[in-house]
Image (spheres, grey):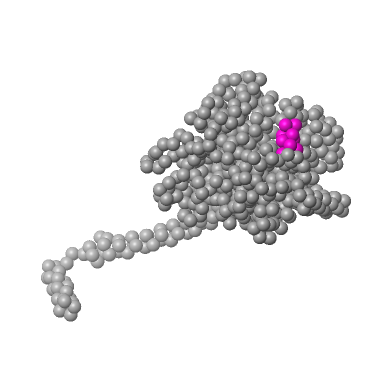
Amino acid sequence: MTAEFPPGLLLIVGALLVPFLKGTVRSSYMLALPLLGIWQLTMLEAGTFGTMTTFGLEQTHVRVDKLSLLFGYIFYIAATLGSVFAWKINDRMEQTSAVVHVGAAIGAVFAGDLITLFFYWELTAISSAVIIWSRRTDRAYRAGFRYLIVQITSGLLLLSGTAMYANATGSIAFNAIGLDSPGGILILLAFGIKCAFPMLHNWLQDAYPEASATGTVFLSAFATKLAVYALARGYAGTEVLIWIGATMTAFPIFYAVIENDLRRVLAYSLNNQLGFMVAGIGIGTTLAINGAVSHAFAHIIYKALLFMSMGAVLHRVGTVKGSELGGLYKSMPWTTGFCIVGAASISAFPLFSGFVTKSMILTAAAEEGYLIVFLVLLFASAGVFHHSGIKIPFFAFFAHDSGKRPKEAPFNMLLAMGVAAFFCIGIGVYPEPLYALLPFPVDYTPYTMTHVVTTLQLLIFSGLAFAVLQRTGLYPPELKSTVLDFDFSYRWLLPRFARWAVRVGGHAIKRLEAGIDLRIAHFIRVVYRHHGPDGVMARTTTVGSMVQWVIVLLGVYLALYLVWG
């Protein structure tokens, strides 16, 4: 199996068999597909393959370089972990769509042109919506439809931008795009929707927590990181991304702190972590790009680990509401330990994966003189420790004993979490294998005295602040509530405004119709008065009278002609 067979199609075509297999055979097959895919990547050589010309434009179906290979490897690793975690799930709809989703994401990162990218882009949207619907609840159906509308909009923007970009440049090659043309702006907006830019982000918090315990693990790994890849490929060094990314790191913190649903907390922290990657891509130096894509690599694993731990809780307890949990460490110690590893990784503790990747982005921001951005990223680093490093494990497993004593997670779930935890610690302790995969040569040492001491100080003071707020009762309690975010504007405010506009507009239309009816009736009466049987225009006149009128009109015409003619 060589480059003639695109890596993404391996899973998309392979998904055709999934519905026809049963039980352990199906689970084994789903695990074999990503393992086979990893083997295929090791056989690929750098270059472009599958080139063809359509309507005078050159398409490249497969483009292999260090950037695409990095994302290809981590996508296959995430698919392997997800398959192990979902080993005992017997849902043809979810399992088939999950395999297609992974294949579409991998196909997209190896796409060498924008048309091929668009095909896989839309396939990721459709397949991920099916994953959400697979939970088969009313909330999942509604969230899935909202999600699909947003993602299809992203695809339409990508297609429109591609047409405009091709018209301006004569090429659809997926390389550096920039913002020099309207097409480039539309493509950036398409990428921004999938990357959950500010005010375009609520599809993430709305949809991901509504999927099943296993479906959310698949969703968390691919779509948003595909957008990160696309930004790194097309918009590296675009300065506006620095400020967008800094904003993304900061604003989700406040929502995550007050959110009760712990999977929704993780969705907000996902948005926060994406901000670090976007900011790094905007800075655009080799260190910043290496930091952004390596952070994406590490983030996929530790975010999957956190979603798996909460998925295990949901599987055993039936809820992930912080107000209904607590004390689970007594009966789920392994899940608790794995969750703590994920929390330490996302918080960038030394010896965990987040430390050796996030610090590259912070260093790049400082070296390039972005002081405000650097301070915002530091604040966001402390914030993520609050809502994901402390809040998730604390309220799920330790706070206010709920009295629930569920069984430990099934072995396959523990195995998936254990492997993910191994990667989190392994990358943190020995990052050189990851650094070797990065697009540019790495000249960076994460474990310096300055990096370690600064990070530990930040985390210690952040933990101290959490403890003080908890002890004084100032920390927002876990309550049954609905957090209002930007989606309030189009999910609640816009429909009510539309109904009000229709109601007011209906009254205005009725008044307009009544006024028009009155004027038409008046016109009819006037016409009838003059042209009716008794009207002036209906009366009979003598021939002499008509001749007089003709003479008068001819006289008027002659006078006008003599004056102006």
Q: Position of residue 296 (x, y in %)?
A: 65, 43
Q: Is residue 257 left or right of residue 125?
A: right
Q: How many marks?
A: 0
Q: Is residue 320 above or below residue 493?
A: above
Q: Is residue 114 left or right of residue 406?
A: left
- Front-most of residues 317 and 281: 281
Q: Hey, which residue is sitting farthest bottom in the picture? A: 563
Q: Position of residue 129 (x, y in %)?
A: 58, 37
- Quadrant where the image shows the C terminus: bottom left
Would you say residue 545 is visible in this rendering? no
Magenta span contains residue 441: no
Residue at image location 47% in from the left, 42% down from the top: 113
Residue at image location 55% in from the left, 39% down from the top: 65
Q: Position of residue 6 (x, y in %)?
A: 51, 32
Residue at image location 47% in from the left, 35% down from the top: 49
- Front-most of residues 177 and 478: 177
Q: What secondary structure characterizes most of the magenta part?
A: helix
State the extent of the magenta-drawn residues as a range.
418-427
Which quarter of the figure has residue 76? Answer: top right
